[in-house]
Every structure is written in structure tokens, then in C-alpha cells.
Amino acid sequence: MDERDEERVIVEETPPRVERETTVVTGNGGGGGAILAVVLVLIVAVLLFLWLGGYLGDVADQTNIDVDVEAPKVDVPDIDVNLPPPEQPAPSPPANSS
């Protein structure tokens, strides 16, 4: 037999199996508590600022304010705004019907 008469079979090699690994990284979990602490500190600071600054409390009960200021006298001349009546627009010529 000749080589040309033989049936050739080409066998493909299967690719090697690749195993995948998953790495789970865990943190210490303290980030949420730190954010909560910062928010609480900011709220307390704003409330203290408002309370110590007198913006909160019984300040509104004392409304005995007397402002005695004379308004200045301003002399303004009379202004006459008489405008002539507007001119009537010229009538437009009739449309050409032919």
C-alpha cells in the first residue's frame, strides 16, 4: 500500500483544563461606623453652634424693638409723559386676483 491510499485522521488535542480560583477579600468592617460617627459629630456641632449663638431658645419672646428713624425728605419734580398718538399704518393695496 502506498501512503496516499491510507486514510489520514487528524486528531485535535483538547486544550488543557483551566481551573479558576476565586479570591474573597474581606475587610475589617469598620467603615460604616466611622461614617456614622462623623455624621453624628457634624450634627452635634451644628446644634451647638445654633444653641450657643442664640439662634435657638427664648430670643423670639423679646420683641420690644423700637426703631425711630425719620425718613429723609426727597423733592422730585413732576414729570409729564404725554406721547403723541401712534401713526395709523398705511392701508395695504388689494391683492391681485387675476
Image: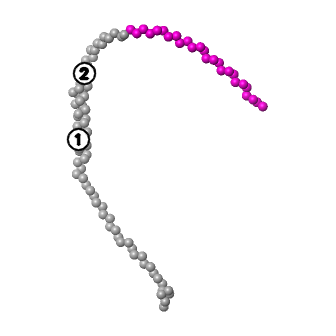
The reply to whether the magenta stretch includes residue 70 is no
Viewer-proximal residue among 45 and 78:
78
Which colouring convention does the figure follow? one colour
Prevailing SS of the magenta stretch = loop
In this picture, residue 13 sits left or right of residue 25: right
Identity of the residue drawn at 25% across and 19% down: 61
- Decide which of tag 2 and tag 1 comes sooner along the chain: 1
Badge 2 element:
helix
Distance CA(mark 2)–CA(mark 1) = 31 Å
Which residue is drawn at the image coordinates 25% and 35% (left, top)? 43
Question: Dot 2, crowdedness within 10 Å: few (<14), some or many (≥20)?
Answer: few
Q: Quadrant of residue 64?
A: top left
Q: Looking at the image, which residue sits at the far right?
A: 98
Where the C terminus falls, by quadrant? top right
Q: Is residue 23 above or below residue 11?
A: above
Q: In this rendered view, identify the residue nearer to me: 49 or 96.
A: 96
Provide the residue designation for mark 1. 37
- Which residue is located at x 23 percent, y 48 percent? 30
Image coordinates of residue 20 in percent, x first then y, are: 32, 65
Query: What is the secondary structure assignment of the residue under circle 1?
Result: helix
Q: Identity of the amino acid at label 2?
A: Val
* Circle 2 residue: 59
Task: Give the magenta part as a residue range.
Answer: 73-98
- Magenta stretch contains residue 87: yes
Give the crowd class for mark 1: few <14, some 14-19, many >=20 residues within 10 Å.
few
Where residue 2 appears, x then y in whole percent? Answer: 49, 89
Q: In x, y percent, where is residue 80?
A: 52, 10
The amino acid pointed to by label 1 is: Ala
Q: Is residue 76 above or below residue 18?
A: above
Residue farthest along the bottom direction in this orientation: 1
